[in-house]
Image (cartoon, rainbow, N blue to C red):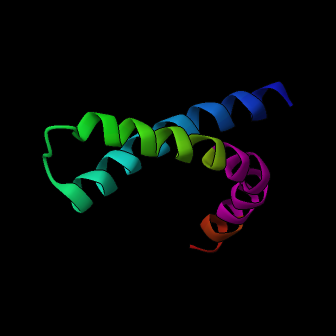
């Protein structure tokens, strides 16, 4: 369980940070307040990503094993 929580925190942190930067850039470009907008978007995205990662992670991990076995 400890591993699952740590993994969800790290994965959601990384993905939400990178994805929020990308989406913010796509939406507003290199605006003078880019970092402010990005950090706001990231602060909203990280908790959602963490919950999704924690809940969906085990199912998706098992699904990936099944798919890899068929390839």
* x, y percent for residue 57: 72, 51
* x, y percent for residue 5: 76, 32
* x, y percent for residue 43: 52, 38
Residue 11 drawn above or below residue 53 = above
Front-most of residues 56 and 35: 35
- Is 9 on the left-hand or right-hand side of 14? right
- Label count reads 0
Front-most of residues 65 and 61: 61
Determine if the magenta segment contains residue 70: no
Q: Residue furthest right?
A: 1
Q: Residue at x 61, y 48 (%)?
A: 49
Instruction: Kindly indicate the quadrant of the structure image that contains residue 34.
Output: top left
Q: Residue at x 70, y 53 (%)?
A: 52
Q: Quadrant of the C terminus?
A: bottom right
Residue 6 drawn above or below residue 40 = above
- Is 59 on the left-hand or right-hand side of 30? right
From which residue to which does the magenta span run? 50-65
Q: Residue furthest bottom?
A: 70
Residue 64 drawn above or below residue 54 = below
Q: Quadrant of the N terminus?
A: top right
Q: Residue at x 75, y 45 (%)?
A: 54
Determine if the magenta segment contains residue 60: yes
* x, y percent for residue 40: 43, 40
Q: Residue at x 64, y 32 (%)?
A: 9
Magenta-colored segment: predominant secondary structure: helix
């Amino acid at each position: 369980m400890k591993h699952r929580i740590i993994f969800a925190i790290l994965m959601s942190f990384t993905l939400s940070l990178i994805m929020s930067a990308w989406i913010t850039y796509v939406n507003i470009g290199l605006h003078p307040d880019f970092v402010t907008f990005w950090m706001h978007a990231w602060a909203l995205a990280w908790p959602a990503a963490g919950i999704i990662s924690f809940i969906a992670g085990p199912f998706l991990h098992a699904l990936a094993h099944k798919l890899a076995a068929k390839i």
